[in-house]
Image: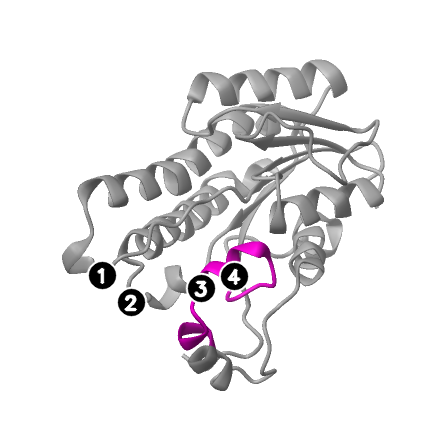
């Protein structure tokens, strides 16, 4: 499906980002994966995968990633903004640093990647951008004022890019998962997860492969009449 296409994915060192990179590789894409880690990523040793280690809040680094992808392949067809962090705390106790670090990584990092690829996509006359957000960014969540704010800001950015660049052949959508079975969920207390699942129609957490499949859909021609949308992957969560 993605043969001869170039895909840039952030946050590929584990979990959702790693699963998305693997899914694109399985579909024939050339993938440039961004992460902080300099250690080679298990499961992503592939001739069409390039690991680029750095900080997405560093615009110079992101520009270098985009320039390398274009120099190596001649295009950037898909951008998946997956990288993100959490620093949960009650709002009344949340420090400036906890707020700033989450907003900087999640929102500014996504902004940097979008701004870096858009000029190339405009010249190509085509491109797909998928931004990973969260149910927290739609409805808010206690203890996640910083995270919810960052994801809400990305939703606004997604819709703005879709409106401004739709006539250029560029699509921009967002995915909003709830709890997904990755190692990150191990840090969430059972007391937090259990009430959410009780209000979820499917009664379970999602899987990385389900998120990857949805990402492939939004990155393919199957979604060519869909832009500026937030696709909820929450198992039927009642909010």
Quarter of image, res 72? top right
Sequence-wise first label, 3 or 1: 1
- Mark 1 and mark 2 in contact (Cβ < 8 Å)? yes
Q: Tag on residue 135?
A: none
Cβ atoms at labels 4 and 1 below 8 Å apart: no
Q: Residues within 10 Å of mark 1 (few under 14, many from 20)?
A: few
Earlier sequence position, callout 2 versus callout 1: 1
Magenta-colored stretch includes residue 190? yes
Q: In the image, residue 67 lies at what x, y percent?
A: 61, 16
Vertical order, 68 against 211 (above or below)? above
Residue that carries the numbered disc 4 in the rendered image: 185
Residue under numbered circle 1: 90
Q: Position of residue 120 (x, y in %)?
A: 59, 24
| In the image: residue 49, left or right of residue 56 | right
Residue 100, horizontal then vertical, whole percent: 26, 39
Q: Is residue 160 above or below residue 119?
A: below
Q: Secondary structure at mark 2?
A: loop
Of labels 2 and 4, earlier in sequence is: 2
Please tell me which residue is depicted at 54% across the width and 43% down the height of the picture.
166
Mark 2, mark 4: which one is toward the viewer?
Answer: 4
- Marks 2 and 4: CB-CB under 8 Å? no
Inter-mark Cα distance, 2 to 4: 16 Å
**Disc 2 target residue:** 142
- 219 shown above or below 55: below
**Contact (Cβ within 8 Å) of mark 3 with mark 2:** no
How far apart marks 3 and 4 lie (CA) works out to 5 Å
**The one of 153 and 192 positioned closer to us in this rendering:** 192
Q: In the image, what residue occupies the spot 54% across and 44% down?
A: 82
Magenta-drawn segment: 176-193
Residue 230 visible to an observer of this rendering: no
> Is label 3 in a helix, a strand or a loop?
loop
């Amino acid at each position: 499906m993605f043969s001869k296409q170039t895909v840039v994915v952030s946050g590929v060192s584990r979990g959702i980002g790693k699963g998305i990179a693997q899914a694109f590789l399985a579909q024939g894409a050339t993938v440039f994966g961004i992460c902080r880690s300099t250690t080679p990523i298990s499961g992503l040793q592939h001739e069409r995968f390039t690991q680029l280690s750095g900080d997405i809040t560093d615009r110079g680094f992101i520009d270098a990633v985009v320039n390398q992808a274009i120099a190596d392949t001649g295009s950037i067809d898909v951008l998946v903004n997956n990288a993100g962090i959490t620093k949960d705390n009650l709002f009344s106790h949340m420090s400036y640093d906890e707020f700033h670090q989450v907003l900087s990584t999640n929102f500014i990092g996504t902004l940097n990647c979008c701004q870096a690829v858009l000029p190339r996509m405009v010249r190509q006359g085509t491109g797909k951008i998928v931004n990973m957000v969260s149910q927290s960014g739609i409805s808010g969540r206690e203890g996640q004022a910083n995270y919810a704010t960052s994801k809400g800001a990305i939703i606004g950015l997604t819709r703005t890019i879709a409106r401004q660049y739709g006539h250029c052949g560029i699509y921009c959508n967002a995915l909003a998962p709830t709890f997904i079975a990755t190692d990150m969920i191990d840090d969430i207390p059972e007391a937090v997860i259990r009430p959410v699942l009780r209000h979820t129609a499917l009664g379970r957490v999602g899987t990385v492969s389900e998120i990857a499949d949805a990402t492939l859909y939004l990155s393919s021609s199957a979604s060519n009449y869909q832009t500026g949308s937030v696709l909820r992957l929450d198992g039927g969560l009642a909010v």
